[in-house]
Structures are given as structure tokens and as C-alpha cells.
Image: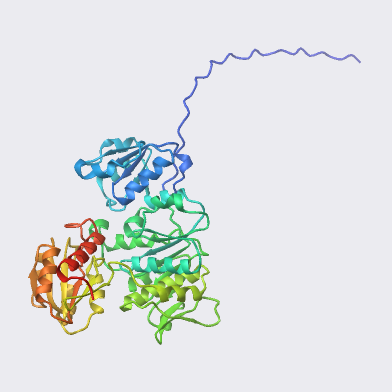
């Protein structure tokens, strides 16, 4: 049988036009919910909004990592020149407002003090340019570390400082960062793998957080504050709640069982919940009893007793309970907690004892930037109308009527300073004698004229400091200098 041969026909391949060389596309930005990943962004450029402590640290860090940076601030050029003179070559800067140059950047870093509804942020959002917090920029460049975050309206600095002392007593390498200590971006070069970062985190920092996920966190309390920045109490609460939003279930979050707002917030928390409060009936983890703090974590057979630090006021007992729970939840032994508590002497500008001057006990509580903080300070004072109270500064919404009851029981004279002076006088008239004083220097001078042996001069302003000082620390330092000037050396 013969075979049939098939004719194989070859199709001519169609000639293709030579492909045009395409320009390499820049990497796609990560979705809005994602964390900052340095490798995505090449060399920028990056816009850093705000030339305060955090913004300057973020700009220096990004420049050191090879990014081109535009540092932008609304303040006049003349106020910024001193800080700008120390910037790296890769950092350009502008003052007098945020120009459209920020819209030519690939991403932006927002300083904590810039309101979330600022026009520049609306423009960045409309342009599809992602905005990150200084906190997350810093963590992206760090090796694996253990992060412990402290937030709340009041008590953050004392609790964070005490917590850092506890980890140090446990022989851990610790960095105290955030609102207290060094800016987080400024610490990147000194942080090593396995270190502990204790972060004092404000609502300003947390509202910008995309994927901030600490290994332990504490929410100390919740009262109205910074509402002009956030827009309302609901927004302020939501910002604070972001401290635990992305935490893993195996981690722990510490809550104040005596604060209704904090307890309500805890309902939405995924991690382990550890409560502290006045009695064991309301929580499972920490409470005071017989002059001690009792600690009882899930799985412990019985509570462990720890002596609290020798600090005035019930608020400091709460701070200590939160600090202890943060530490033991991360494996620190109660013995290290006890050691740190015994050695702890308090924090500057928080009910800081400044000695006796010309018979007057002098106390620096410059950190009291709201009415609730001043109420806490007054709660530590005797009820014999022996306090000369310096109040005022840049006021926050709500006024000062909430101080009337405590002032009428404890305060001999109110010395008003700053922008809030007239409002303080109006709200407290009749509760105590009010002496208008434009400046802190005048208030201290009048206090030494009015004061008698055994009375207390208390700086607890219930206001922000920005009308006359760079910050509350500057105000506190000036107060202590004035004490030396008018009252002599402490006894």
C-alpha cells in the first residue's frame, strides 16, 4: 500500500512593527491601608509637613536613607531659618504656607500638630498622594523591636517613663520616645534588634496611623481634650482607639476599669484585655489593696504584691498599675517592677517638688495643660485654702468652671496669666481671690508677696503654653528660674 504525501505549506509570518521602548513605570503606591515600605518609593521625592521636632527628625531620616525631601511649614521664613540652617543637602524647605510643590511629591509625612482636615491634606488626598505618620516612617527603618505604647488624656508621660524604668530594671535595652524623650525618627540609628521602644503616643500621632501595631498598649483615661484639632469627642476617641486597631490577638492592651469611656472603647479590642482599677470586683489584672498593688494575670495561681512608687495622688497609683501590667504582659518579672517602683522619683514638670522658698512650698505642674490635669493636682493639696494657684495660657474649649469646687476649698489666690486670663477670672470669680497677671514672671512675684509660711505656690495652668512659651517644658523651666530669682535657693 502506497503512502500519500501531504504537501506542507509554510505560512509566512507577518512582519511586526518594532516595539517602542517603554519608559519604566514607577512602582505602584501601596493601598491606603498598607504600612510604609521604603523599597516601594525609590528616592522620592517626599514631602514632610511641619518643621517642628518630629518633622525635622523625619526629614533628616529620609535624607539619610537616600530620599529627596521637601520640608514645608506654614510659619514665616524668619521663624524657620535657624532650624533650616542645620538641614542636610538633600532637604529643601519652604515657609509661609504649603505650596503646590508638595503635590509633586510621591508621598507625604505629616507632623502630629497639623489638623487632619488641613487644606494641604485635602489636596494631597485629592491628588492620590498617600500621607504617613512620623511614627510609622521611623518603625519602617528599624530592625525587629518590641513596641510598648502608652496613650490617654492625662498621665502618659509619667506612665511611659515609669514603664521604661521597669524594662531597664529587667536589664532590657530601652528607648523612651515619642512625646517624651527623643522623636521616634531621631532614634532610628541607635535602635538595635530586640530593643524595647516605650512610646508616649498622642491622639495626633495615632490619628495618622495606618498599620501601627504595638506589642503592648495602655489607654489610661479619656476626657475631652484637643477637640479643636479633632473636631469632636467622637473623633478624639476614635484616634485613641487606633492604638490597638491593628494589634495581634496574642498581644495585650491595658485599660482603666474606672473610666467609662475607656471601658466602652475596650469592647472593640481584639488583643487580650487587662484591666486595672480601684477594686478586684471590676477587673482581673491589677488593683490596690493594703498600700500595695496586686497583680494577677490570666493563668497566675494567685496575685502578686508590689509596692507602688512614692508619688502623690491616686492618679499616680493608676499610672503605676498600668505600667506594671504593660511590663508583666511582656514577660517582665514582678521583682523588676518592684525594683523600678522603689527607685522612681517622678517626672519633671509633673507635680515636681521645687523645694521651699521664703516659707512657700513650690510645685511645678506645668504639664497640666487641661482642666482635668489641674483637678488632679489640686486633689493632692490640703483643704485649708493655702494654695496660690497660677492658671492660664492658651485656653482649650470648655472653660474653667469645672475648677470652681476644688478652688473654693483649697485655693487662697488665683494668679492668671496669658490669653486665658479674662476667661479664668470670669469662670472662677467668687471661688477665690483672682489676681490678673499678664506674665508668669509677674505671677511668681505677686505670689511671693501674698504667700505666707506653710502655703503652697502651684503652677498648674490648665492651658496650653504656646501663647508665651515654646512648650510646657519651656514654661516649667522658666517657672523654676523665676523661683530662684524671687525665692532664693530651695530649702
Kindly identify the residue that appears in the image at 48 percent across and 65 percent down.
271
Residue 255, quarter of picture = bottom left
Query: Which residue in the rendered view is the most extreme toward the right?
Result: 1
Instruction: Name the one closer to the observer, 319 or 265.
Output: 319
In this rendering, does residue 268 appear at all? no
In the rendered structure, the answer to whether residue 12 lies left or right of residue 152 reads right
Q: Is 37 situated above or below 240?
A: above
The spot of residue 184 in percent (x, y) is: 39, 53
The spot of residue 438 in percent (x, y) is: 9, 62
Residue 470, quarter of picture = bottom left
> Where the C terminus falls, by quadrant?
bottom left
Q: Is 38 situated above or below 382?
A: above
> Where the N terminus falls, by quadrant?
top right
- Give the total of numbered labels: 0
The spot of residue 458 in percent (x, y) is: 20, 73
In this rendering, does residue 355 appear at all? yes
Kindly identify the residue that appears in the image at 40 percent across and 87 percent down.
290
The spot of residue 137 in percent (x, y) is: 41, 48
Instruction: Name the one closer to the observer, 86 or 34.
Output: 86
Q: How is the image coloured?
A: rainbow
In the rendered structure, the answer to whether residue 375 lies left or right of residue 220 reads left
Query: Which residue in the rendered view is the most extreme toward the bottom?
Result: 290
Instruction: Name the one closer to the observer, 310 or 147.
Output: 310
Residue 220, quarter of picture = bottom left
In the rendered structure, the answer to whether residue 250 lies left or right of residue 154 reads right
Amino acid at each position: 500500500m502506497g503512502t500519500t504525501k501531504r504537501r506542507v505549506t509554510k505560512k509566512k509570518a507577518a512582519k511586526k512593527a518594532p516595539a517602542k521602548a517603554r519608559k519604566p513605570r514607577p512602582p505602584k503606591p501601596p493601598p491606603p491601608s498598607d504600612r510604609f515600605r521604603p523599597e516601594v518609593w525609590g528616592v522620592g521625592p517626599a514631602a514632610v509637613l511641619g518643621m517642628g521636632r518630629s518633622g525635622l527628625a523625619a526629614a533628616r531620616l529620609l535624607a539619610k536613607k537616600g530620599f529627596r525631601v521637601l520640608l514645608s511649614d506654614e510659619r514665616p521664613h524668619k521663624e524657620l531659618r535657624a532650624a533650616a540652617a542645620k538641614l542636610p543637602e538633600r532637604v529643601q524647605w519652604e515657609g509661609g504656607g504649603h505650596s503646590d510643590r508638595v503635590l509633586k511629591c510621591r508621598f507625604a509625612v505629616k507632623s502630629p500638630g497639623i489638623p487632619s482636615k488641613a487644606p494641604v491634606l485635602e489636596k494631597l488626598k485629592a491628588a492620590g498622594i498617600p500621607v504617613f505618620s512620623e511614627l510609622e516612617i521611623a518603625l519602617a527603618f528599624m530592625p525587629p523591636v518590641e513596641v510598648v505604647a502608652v496613650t490617654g488624656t492625662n498621665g502618659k508621660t509619667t506612665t511611659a517613663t515609669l514603664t521604661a524604668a521597669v524594662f531597664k530594671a529587667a536589664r532590657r535595652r530601652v528607648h523612651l520616645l515619642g512625646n517624651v524623650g527623643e522623636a521616634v525618627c531621631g532614634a532610628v540609628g541607635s535602635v538595635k534588634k530586640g530593643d524595647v521602644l516605650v512610646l508616649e503616643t498622642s491622639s495626633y500621632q495615632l490619628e495618622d496611623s495606618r498599620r501601627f501595631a504595638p506589642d503592648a498598649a495602655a489607654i489610661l483615661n479619656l476626657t475631652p481634650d484637643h477637640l479643636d484639632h479633632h473636631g469632636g469627642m467622637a473623633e478624639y476617641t476614635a484616634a485613641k482607639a487606633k492604638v490597638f486597631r491593628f494589634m495581634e490577638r496574642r498581644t495585650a492592651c491595658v485599660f482603666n476599669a474606672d473610666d467609662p469611656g475607656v471601658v466602652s472603647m475596650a469592647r472593640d479590642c481584639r488583643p487580650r484585655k487587662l484591666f486595672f482599677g480601684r477594686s478586684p470586683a471590676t477587673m482581673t489584672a491589677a488593683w490596690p489593696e493594703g498600700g500595695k498593688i496586686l497583680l494577677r494575670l490570666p493563668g497566675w495561681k494567685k496575685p502578686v504584691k508590689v509596692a507602688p512608687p512614692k508619688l502623690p495622688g491616686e492618679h499616680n497609683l493608676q499610672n503605676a498599675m498600668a505600667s506594671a501590667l504593660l511590663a508583666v504582659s511582656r514577660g517582665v518579672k514582678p521583682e523588676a517592677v518592684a525594683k523600678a517602683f522603689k527607685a522612681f522619683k517622678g517626672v519633671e514638670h509633673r507635680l515636681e517638688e521645687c523645694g521651699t522658698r521664703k516659707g512657700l512650698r513650690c510645685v511645678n505642674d506645668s504639664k497640666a495643660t487641661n482642666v482635668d490635669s489641674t483637678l488632679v493636682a489640686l486633689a493632692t493639696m490640703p483643704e485649708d485654702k493655702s494654695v496660690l494657684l497660677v492658671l492660664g495660657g492658651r485656653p482649650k474649649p470648655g472653660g474653667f468652671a469645672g475648677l470652681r469646687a476644688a478652688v473654693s476649698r483649697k485655693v487662697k489666690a488665683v494668679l492668671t496669666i496669658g490669653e486665658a486670663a479674662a476667661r479664668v477670672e470670669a469662670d472662677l470669680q467668687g471661688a477665690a481671690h483672682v489676681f490678673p497677671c499678664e506674665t508668669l514672671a509677674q505671677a511668681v512675684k505677686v505670689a511671693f508677696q501674698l504667700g505666707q509660711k506653710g502655703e503652697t505656690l502651684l503652677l498648674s495652668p490648665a492651658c496650653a503654653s504656646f501663647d508665651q512659651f515654646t512648650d510646657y517644658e519651656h514654661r516649667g523651666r522658666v517657672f523654676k528660674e523665676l523661683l530662684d530669682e524671687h525665692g532664693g535657693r530651695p530649702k
